Amino acid sequence: QQPVQSPQAVILREGEDAVINCSSSKALYSVHWYRQKHGEAPVFLMILLKGGEQKGHDKISASFNEKKQQSSLYLTASQLSYSGTYFCGTGTFGNEKLTFGTGTRLTIIP
Amino acid sequence: DTAVSQTPKYLVTQMGNDKSIKCEQNLGHDTMYWYKQDSKKFLKIMFSYNNKELIINETVPNRFSPKSPDKAHLNLHINSLELGDSAVYFCASAKREANTEAFFGQGTRLTVV
């Protein structure tokens, strides 16, 4: 079953912050985050492995709560280039069953 | 060099036809996937292969048959195409280890008319 993401869509002005959530009904070992721009393939952002782990680069970071089977992606001071659809991907012990969430469409306006 | 390449990029065909989409990766990955992305943008896993062995078949109709001649290739053959098969199909590959990313091909937009 696909992980569920929320919100489904969000519109922000440049410079505002956003949080995208990902929840799974199954126990998780890893969480991936990808961004897909219109007409393109999904592109990797980051992977989180351990419960409670947080990662980030530049103004995009993420957390992973293993016990709650949830992950959140944080986008700070959003830029126009952040627009796209964000997917979380969840895996078991390996990447053999990499299943993606329902997606969140993020639109950044000037 | 393209890491994951799939062909063709666009495919328009009539209902009832049989078509194939090819995928090749030059990253030395063990795991390859096919995903279907419909008009609602859901990215649904169809098949997962590890070292040419089928790992996942996510309730995909029998008309879809993946073939992996070696671990660098995973092709998708579709028989008796239906209107509902219209979608973008993505091939992807990854190492088996969980702490590594997946790489996607550019996608094949299939339109059944």
Image (tube, rainbow, N blue to C red):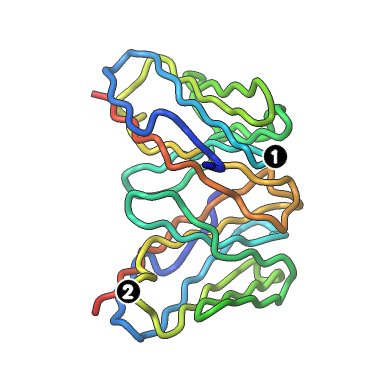
For label 1, the SS is loop
Q: Single out the residue that lies furthest toward the front.
A: B1
User: Residue A87 vs residue A84: left or right?
Assistant: right
Q: Position of residue A73 (x, y in %)?
A: 52, 73
Tag in front: 1 or 2: 1
Check if mark 1's residue and mark 2's residue have beta carbons within 8 Å. no
Q: Chain of mark 2?
A: A
Residue A39's place in the image compared with B78, above or below, is below
Q: What is the chain letter for disc 1?
A: B
Q: Which mark is residue A99?
A: none
For disc 1, the neighbor class at 10 Å (few under 14, some 14 to 19, many from 20) is: few
Q: Quadrant of residue A24?
A: bottom right
Residue A62 at what x, y percent from top left? Answer: 58, 74
Q: Which residue is mark 2?
A: A80
Residue A16: image location, x then y, percent: 36, 85
Helix, strand, or loop for circle 2? helix
Q: Residue at x 49, y 24 (%)?
A: B61
In the picture, the quarter occupied by the C terminus of chain A is: bottom left
Q: Nearer the viewer, residue A98 or A79?
A: A79
Q: CA distance from mark 1 to mark 2?
A: 35 Å
Left/right placement of residue A13 relative to residue B60 reads left
x, y percent for residue B60: 51, 29
Given the image, on which type of amino acid does mark 2 rest? Answer: Leu
* Rendered residue at 54%/40% (across/down): B4
The residue that appears at 37% across and 57% down in the rendered structure is A37
Amino acid at dot 1: Gly
User: Which quarter of the picture shows residue A85?
Assistant: bottom left
Please name the residue that numbered disc 1 is placed on: B28
On the image, which quarter does residue B93 sit in? top right
